[in-house]
Image (spheres, helix red, strand yellow):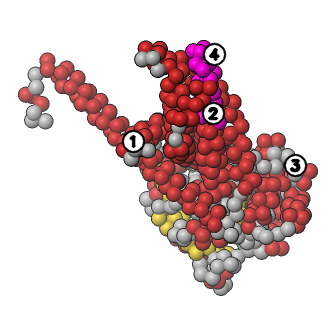
Amino acid sequence: MSDAPDITNSIVANAPPEKDDIVISVRGLKKSFVNAEGERSVVLDSITFDVHKGETIVIMGGSGCGKSTLLNCMIGELPIDRGSVQYRISTINDPVDICQVPNDTLDAVRKRFGILFQSGALFNSMTLAENVALPLREHSRLDERIIDIMVALKLQQVKMLPHRDKFPSQLSGGQKKRGGLARAIALDPEMLFYDEPSAGLDPVTSTAIDQLIMDLSDKLNVTSVVVTHEMDSAFRIADRMILLDKGMVLKMGNRASFEALRDADPNSLTNPSDRLMNQFLNGFGEGPLTDAEGISEFERLIVAP
Amino acid sequence: MTDAPKHPAGKSANPSVANRAIREMGSATLDGLRKGRNFVEDVGGMTGLLFDTVTWTLRSLFMPKVRFRLATLVTQMVRVGVNSIGIIVLVQAFIGCILSLQLAPTLERYGQLERIADVIAIGVIRELGPMITAIVLSGFAGASIAAELGAMVESEEIKALRAHALDPIQFLVVPRFLATVLMIVGLTVIANVVGIAGGYFTSWLVLNVDPEVYIESTKAALVLSDLTTGLVKAGIFGMLISMIACYEGLTVSGGAVGVGNATTSTVVKSIVAIIGTDAIITAIFFAFGL
Ligand SMILES: Nc1ncnc2c1ncn2[C@@H]1O[C@H](COP(=O)(O)OP(=O)(O)OP(=O)(O)O)[C@@H](O)[C@H]1O
Ligand SMILES: [Mg+2]
């Protein structure tokens, strides 16, 4: 059985009861990079999925498979070759295709976004508190005292309040990431994008961040798109999961279907792509991913179905 | 294939040399074309950046909704000016001194040593004041702006600004642009004074020119347009430096090496652009008798 029907099935299986609650829809997204020698390499191809209001969707895949690139395309940071990324934002009546809107609409959409970059991306010339205060100062007309209180609140949520007056260069990698998260949630966004939120954090802090992601999603109905390859964290927070491989969607489905695949006995799986996913989800050292023959088998199956 | 037997084996060495020569010529041409295209791309990119910068500057000055970032501007002015002021004073004092020592023998041969004040005044105020200030600033302000913005690109800070709906041009480029243009004009005034002072003291103490005569002939030689053309030139140099530095910084790629390259090419491109533009402006002023 080829993979294409599998994907369609999972879309149908997870189709929303009412179509209105789709807030992000990615259609046929293709992205390639041109290197210095003028060669073009396709990083993402035919990516299609929807995200519903308030759900947490986890995008997984091996290192270098294009997760960060997908996220950057979705937030309008990278131009795409083909396809569309549509958003429904509460402040704007019509759905917006982020790849085609004028700059001021793009900014209106971005004000409703919160984005946590892989490195945290704090502004090095400002203290942590100033970093968190910046979006509030620029995009709201709040009084400086209220901003101070809100900054303290956001920093407390990520357990970074004691470090409020430090500069980013004085923080550890995990602390920068938490600071970046505090800044991302400063404006109470309706959508949050996370690039590797728990990479580089100790297990306790990592769980706390996962809890925060779930709280935001449950209590404030924030829609979250999370890129990660920490499997524990992924299975904790995900409502639905997408597995990318070689720039394409290998599998998309709800958490239960991924759990079933993870817990299956590798020897009982006959479909090679199921075996491959089983290996990835469990992090096994042996399997079709690391087995050269399996990879060519996989290529034959996926690339030319 | 049918041609192959016609070539004797002994001649096969020659075609390969010719082949290589042609191939090398070809790749050199391609290289040249690529450089040409890069140049056109750079100039296009910088012109676009200048246009956006001027648009944002005007908006921040005249549209009440767009904030004018006075505090940032002041910070940038201090940063551009304070580091370079000492060097500019030092260099310009030497320039005044060198000019008078170089000119003295020629003028003395014609018995016109008192005229040294005129030549130094015109040379410094119209030409060397603005140009030397610009060259020093391209090393101080230009390089540090390019390195700063380049590092911000590498650490995803620029991306994060855009992600927070903050325009990097409005936020970062406009204050650096205004600070460079304002400070270069101010620094040029200082450079002019110091350059003339250098000439004055050298002429007085070394060449024994009467200091009062020196001051009188300086005053007589200068007209207002000498000062204004010099300052207009300085302003244009400031635009060039800040645009080249911001463009190089914002288009950095390739990590720490990329940041280093951006710094170097900012200084090189600024100096070429300053001297090239100087020639063009001087020709225009000459044509209009300014
Ligand atoms: N600006 C760029 N120019 C050229 N190639 C790029 C660029 N950015 C990313 N790539 C390539 O695209 C592919 C995907 O990169 P991406 O950063 O999206 O990976 P990732 O899935 O986020 O990996 P990781 O899990 O390690 O963060 C990589 O092969 C990378 O080499
Ligand atoms: Mg990544």
Q: Amino acid at mark 3?
A: Asp
Q: CA distance from mark 1 to mark 4?
A: 34 Å
Q: Is residue B261 left or right of residue A241?
A: left
Q: CA distance from mark 4 to mark 2?
A: 18 Å
Is the stretch drawn in magenta largely helix, strand or loop? helix
Q: Residue A35: x and y, percent?
A: 47, 45
Q: Dot 3 lies on which element?
A: loop
Q: Which mark is residue B193?
A: 2
Q: Which residue is mark 4?
A: B205
Q: Amino acid at mark 4?
A: Leu
Closer to viewer: mark 3 or mark 1: 1
User: Magenta segment, which residues?
Assistant: B190-211
**Does label 4 lie on the same chain as label 3?**
no
Closer to viewer: mark 3 or mark 2: 2
CB atoms of marks 3 and 4 within 8 Å: no
**Residue in the image at 69% along x and 60% along y:** B68
Q: Amino acid at mark 2?
A: Val
Q: Dot 4 lies on which element?
A: helix
Residue B200's image quarter? top right
Q: CA distance from mark 3 to mark 2?
A: 44 Å
Q: CA distance from mark 3 to mark 1?
A: 57 Å
Residue B196's image quarter? top right
Q: Which residue is mark 1?
A: B286
Mark with earlier residue (1, 2): 2
Above or below, A28 against B162 in this view is below
> Is residue B170 covered in magenta?
no
Q: Which mark is residue A280?
A: none
